[in-house]
Amino acid sequence: MKVLFSDTRPLDCAAREKFLLTEEIMMENAASGLEEGFFSFCDDLEIRPEFLKILVLCGSGNNGADGYVFARRMTGNFLEDGGIALFQVSQPKSDLCKIQAERAKKTGVNFYSGDFENLPKEFQKADVIVDCLFGSGFHGEFPTEVNSLFEKINSLTAYKIACDLPSGLAEDGTCAENIFKANLTVTMGALKSSLYSDSAKDFTGKIIVKDLGISRVNFENSSEKILPNAFLLEESDLRLPHRKSNLVNKGSFGHSAVACGEKPGAACIAASAALRFGSGLVSLVRMDSDFSKEELPQIPAEIMASTSFPQNVTAIAIGPGLSRKHEILEHYFDWLKNHAEIPALIDADACYYKNLPEFLSGRGTNCILTPHPKEFQSLLEICGLGTFSISDCVNKRLELIPLFCKKFPETVLLVKGANPVIGMYSNGKMTVCINPFGTNCLAKAGSGDVLSGLICGLLAQGYKTFEAAVSGSLAHALASRKIKNDYSMTPFSLIEAVADL
């Protein structure tokens, strides 16, 4: 896992004080990071940099100053005369921005301002555009002229590099109407959580971190008072349920039970995922007295059907395709109340159960909830935590997940989205993790049911709740990257892709 910070500007100050750095040293290193991003682009495409035209967009503050430093460092070293130009979207205001602008001017960098059309034609169609306009601290919306500028910039085929954050991305992860759409974001010092919001995913491109004169570890730990607000999951955090012993049988790997209701297809998908992810036995359970597998011809022969939970069940998934009818939900939740030792995955329709707060408070542990934003909205309201819009449930997850988890300690909450967020409050400590690996092919009916089955299968095999949520979510996301065409995924092709992890 990598640490994420909501705002790294306090770390900048702490690092300067602790390690006797200056802002100018940090700016030189920031510009070096932009250079590395530029040359990486050239290397990838095997392009000679001296033949390219680079346009740098500069603002009035220290993010703009980084742009002036980058232009100064590039001029005369790597580019032919006239290979780089500065477009002053706003005039320098901070002291450092002013002095860096003067330094760039003395090296012969060409400055332009006013209308975008004032630029020479070759820079209106630049090969590379570097965004040094706002960076950290942006909020609200752009003025009309900046909106118009970004509409033009984003329509160009140029390779686009953002300095620290794409301009228009706010600290809370929300985006302006016409945010700069980067192919590469070179963020400074440490990773920011805003880069991994759902709203930001289309605008950041590849994200790399540039050291600012000290190592990233030293920067991140420059102050004991400035703590990360989340963690970024890595592929290495995935723990697959590989089998280590040979003297085993199917019962050695647990028995998953999936509650089956009005839409049995969802439960069948979850059951198939649990089986594929290592659960030794899987049963579909429905309360109808005449329930049998013959009603569900699409399920594999190795999945069982029952009207009651098996005695040897080791994990339960409740919610996919179940029903929002109170009597049906109550039937299954009553069983869970009386079997608190059995870990439960709660999803979909089960997130609308009106007695869920009492259930979670009474049970305490062994529960994972996996709502999408609308279901999360319902959870928050049912649990008396407030009424929030769907937009809030997407954009304010890093605030709302701790709100929920602190009310229900030891309960794991995984809120689905472009970048799923997992939270748990345990022993007085809040842990929040972001999974950045999902792809847009997961926006397909049944993909959430696959996630439910994967996590339930891990619970059945003895994984702790938080570990099951992390590994299930990572497996789900990484499997989606193996789907050849983004439009073609089905739940069962996703389940098959899990086998290739």
Image (cartoon, rainbow, N blue to C red):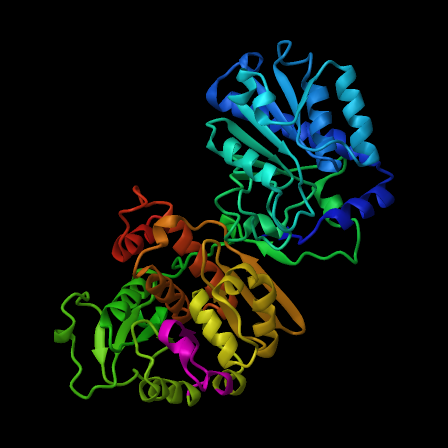
The answer to whether residue 175 is above or below residue 385 is above
Residue 371 visible within the image: no
Total marks shown come to: 0
Q: Does 393 sit left or right of 130 as displayed?
A: left
Q: Does 11 sit left or right of 33 as displayed?
A: right
Q: Which of 450 and 439 is in front in this view?
A: 439
Extreme residue in the top direction: 81
**Can you give x and y, in whole percent of width and height, for residue 493 in the image?**
27, 52
The residue drawn where x is 55% and y is 42% is 179
The answer to whether residue 274 is above or below residue 346 is above
Residue 472 visible within the image: yes
Q: Nearer the viewer, residue 481 or 149?
A: 149
The answer to whether residue 231 is above or below residue 352 is above
Q: In the figure, residue 164 lies in which quadrant?
A: top right
Q: Does 87 sit left or right of 14 as displayed?
A: left
**Can you give x and y, in whole percent of width and height, for residue 497 in the image?**
31, 50
Q: In the figure, residue 27 lies in which quadrant?
A: top right
Q: Does the magenta stretch include residue 271?
A: no
Q: Does the magenta stretch include residue 353?
A: yes
**Can you give x and y, in whole percent of width and height, for residue 159 in the image?**
51, 28
**Can you give x and y, in whole percent of width and height, for residue 450 in the image?**
33, 62
Magenta stretch, residue numbers: 339-358
